Amino acid sequence: MARLLSIDYGKKRTGLAVTDPLQIIAGGLATVFTSELFAFLQDYVRREAVERIVIGEPRQTDGSPSENLERVKQFVNRWKRAVPDIPIEFYDERFTSVLAHRAMLDGGLRKKARQNKALVDEISATILLQDYMRARHPSV
């Protein structure tokens, strides 16, 4: 099997998470500057077998598109043209940042650590990937 990779795409920074090769556990991979994301991912998929990429679809709480959706769509289209062998799909990312902050609080992280936006992005990508995996295999 190959890994699943998730992207919490942001204007400045992007959080990434990945599964183990058996797709059992999702964990944070990195937070990269969005301007470096494409090159980072191309390098990563050269080194690791990736079955699919899941990218957060930014929506408002009422389901309407967020201001970041157009940037995400542009990235997805670029990826599909450059790397057609690794599919990329949207997945609802609403509330992942809220859940990431909650996980940080529940984990006992100090206020300074909770203000680390790069860590929040990485945790958000991990939550996104966990939710995606749960939706694919609800009985697990």
Image (cartoon, rainbow, N blue to C red):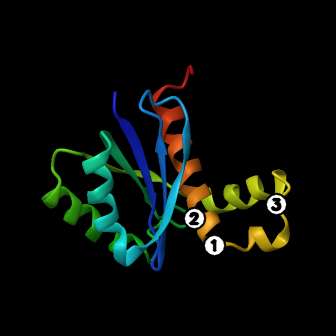
Amino acid type, residue under disc 3 in the picture: Leu
Quickly name the residue at label 2. Answer: 121
Q: Within the image, what quadrant is residue 118 found in?
A: bottom right
Q: Is residue 36 left or right of residue 14?
A: left
Residue 17 in percent (x, y) is at 49, 51
Q: Callout 3 environment at 10 Å: few (<14), some (14 to 19), or many (20+)?
A: few
**Mark number for residue 56?**
none
Q: Callout 2 environment at 10 Å: few (<14), some (14 to 19), or many (20+)?
A: many
Given residues 70 and 112, the one toward you in this image is: 112
Residue farthest toward the front in the current orientation of the protein: 47
Secondary structure beneath dot 2 equals helix
> Which mark sits nearer the N-terminus, 3 or 2?
3
Residue 75 in percent (x, y) is at 29, 67
Amino acid type, residue under disc 1 in the picture: Lys
Asked if the residues shown at circle 1 and circle 2 are in contact, with their CB atoms under 8 angstroms apart, the answer is: yes
Image quadrant containing the C terminus: top right
Amino acid type, residue under disc 2 in the picture: Asp
Q: Within the image, what quadrant is residue 134 found in?
A: top right
Residue 83 in percent (x, y) is at 17, 54
Quickly name the residue at label 1. Answer: 117
Secondary structure beneath dot 1 equals helix
Q: Is residue 65 left or right of residue 74?
A: right
Please, is residue 132 above or below residue 8 in the view?
Answer: above
Point 69% across, 55% down: residue: 99
Quickly name the residue at label 3. Answer: 109
CA–CA distance between discs 1 and 2? Answer: 6 Å
